[in-house]
Image (spheres, grey):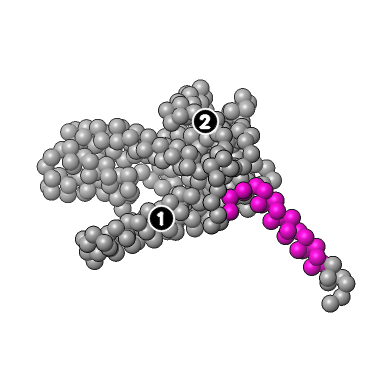
């Protein structure tokens, strides 16, 4: 081997060793080795669940004009590009449930379950699904851009966010694809549950215990991965940040804090579910009482709630990210 090749190999190994030592310094935990409590306790000054929700709503309320304009623009674009929930689909489902279950409360709960699971949308083709996903990603980028300037007390307009927010689209899509791959364990759980229910496997105690144990582990694995991916979706919007760099930085931020982040993200999910239930169920009951076929009351409400969900969840995750960044505790 020539001296020139040997020198190149030495440079490559030296770079690998440097990257490895840097990584081990950033991530003090080791696989299959117990970490003592004194070595993994990491400070994280964060408000409680209600306090974090209050900070999110306060930020939105303080800038209600800006977010109100975004609400109108996104709802109109979404209605034109994707359409609202088809009134005929909703009427068909409502009539079928009415004939099967005369109780108004149970019928409303069934329609609510179909609404939050997408059962009222019918069958959407691949192009519509792709357009819907792209629209959500662009809305996320615009909201993050607006939130970054709003928190820094900058006077911004929605027009500036519409023109400037979508710049890191490709990087965000790549990070989103990583998140989709990280959801594969959850998909396996869903497919396995469907197969187990159809074959009656869960009727036996031992098989059910083994299945639910494996399903819990796979679900925790996806949540473990997705915790840092949510933060990476914000970091990748910074100028000059590439997807892998954003994922590494997000992983460093959440080390020693994953459980607290997971619980707060689950709190966001529960809060939004309660919001949908409080608003949508009375609207469903009102629509059944009015019985006005030409008025798409429930589809319009679903569109409005979807837009509010996007604004609230984006603001909540960004506030959570800023709390992470402002805390300067070392990895643990």
Q: Main secondary structure of the magenta part?
A: helix
- Note whether 8 is above or below 289 in the view shown: below
The x and y percentages for residue 183 are 45, 55
The answer to whether residue 199 shows anywhere in this view is yes
Residue shown at 70%/51% (left/top)? 22
- Which of the 4 image quadrants contains residue 167? top right
Left or right, residue 235 beside residue 19? left
The x and y percentages for residue 161 are 58, 36
Q: How many marks?
A: 2
Residue shown at 18%/42% (left/top)? 107
Left or right, residue 206 beside residue 69? left
Residue 46 bears which disc, if any?
2
- Note whether 199 is above or below 142 in the view shown: below
Q: Which residues are magenta?
A: 8-30
The x and y percentages for residue 262 are 46, 42
The answer to whether residue 77 shows anywhere in this view is no
Name the residue carrying label 1: 217
Residue shown at 64%/39% (left/top)? 330
Q: Secondary structure at mark 1?
A: helix
- Note whether 238 is above or below 57 in the view shown: below
Q: In the depicted view, which residue is nearer to us: 203 or 53? A: 203
Instruction: Please identify the quadrant where the C terminus is shown.
Output: top right
The x and y percentages for residue 218 are 41, 56
Q: Residue furthest bottom?
A: 1
Which of marks 2 and 1 precedes in the sequence? 2
Q: Secondary structure at mark 2?
A: loop
Instruction: Please identify the quadrant where the N terminus is shown.
Output: bottom right
Specify whether residue 14 is painted magenta: yes
Alpha carbon distance from label 1 to label 2: 27 Å
Q: Rate crowding at label 2 as few (under 14), some (14 to 19) or many (20 or more) other CA atoms within 10 Å.
A: few
Q: In the depicted view, which residue is nearer to us: 115 or 297? A: 115
Q: In the depicted view, which residue is nearer to us: 189 or 130? A: 189
């Amino acid at each position: 081997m020539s001296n020139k090749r040997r020198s190149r190999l030495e440079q490559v190994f030296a770079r690998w060793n440097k990257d490895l030592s840097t990584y081990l310094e950033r991530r003090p935990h080791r696989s299959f080795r117990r970490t003592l409590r004194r070595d993994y306790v990491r400070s994280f000054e964060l408000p409680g669940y209600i306090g974090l929700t209050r900070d999110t709503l306060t930020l939105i309320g303080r800038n209600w004009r800006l977010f109100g304009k975004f609400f109108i623009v996104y709802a109109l674009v979404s209605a034109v590009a994707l359409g609202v929930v088809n009134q005929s689909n909703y009427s068909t489902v409502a009539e079928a449930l009415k004939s099967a279950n005369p109780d108004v409360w149970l019928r409303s709960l069934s329609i609510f379950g179909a609404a939050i699971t997408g059962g009222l949308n019918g069958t959407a083709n691949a192009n519509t699904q792709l357009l819907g996903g792209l629209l959500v990603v662009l809305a996320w980028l615009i909201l993050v851009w607006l939130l970054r300037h709003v928190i820094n007390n900058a006077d911004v307009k929605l027009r500036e966010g519409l023109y400037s927010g979508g710049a890191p689209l490709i990087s965000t899509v790549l990070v989103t694809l990583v998140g989709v791959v990280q959801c594969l364990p959850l998909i396996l759980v869903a497919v396995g549950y469907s197969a187990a229910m159809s074959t009656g496997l869960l009727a036996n105690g031992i098989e059910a215990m083994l299945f639910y144990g494996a399903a819990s582990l796979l679900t925790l694995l996806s949540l473990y991965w997705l915790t840092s991916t949510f933060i990476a979706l914000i970091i990748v919007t910074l100028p000059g940040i590439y997807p892998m760099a954003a994922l590494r930085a997000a992983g460093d931020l959440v080390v020693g804090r994953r459980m607290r982040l997971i619980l707060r993200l689950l709190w966001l999910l529960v809060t939004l579910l309660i919001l949908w239930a409080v608003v949508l169920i009375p609207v469903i009951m009102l629509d059944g009482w009015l019985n006005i076929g030409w008025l798409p009351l429930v589809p319009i409400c679903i569109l409005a709630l979807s837009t509010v969900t996007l604004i609230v969840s984006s603001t909540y995750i960004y506030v959570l990210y800023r709390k992470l960044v402002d805390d300067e505790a070392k990895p643990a």
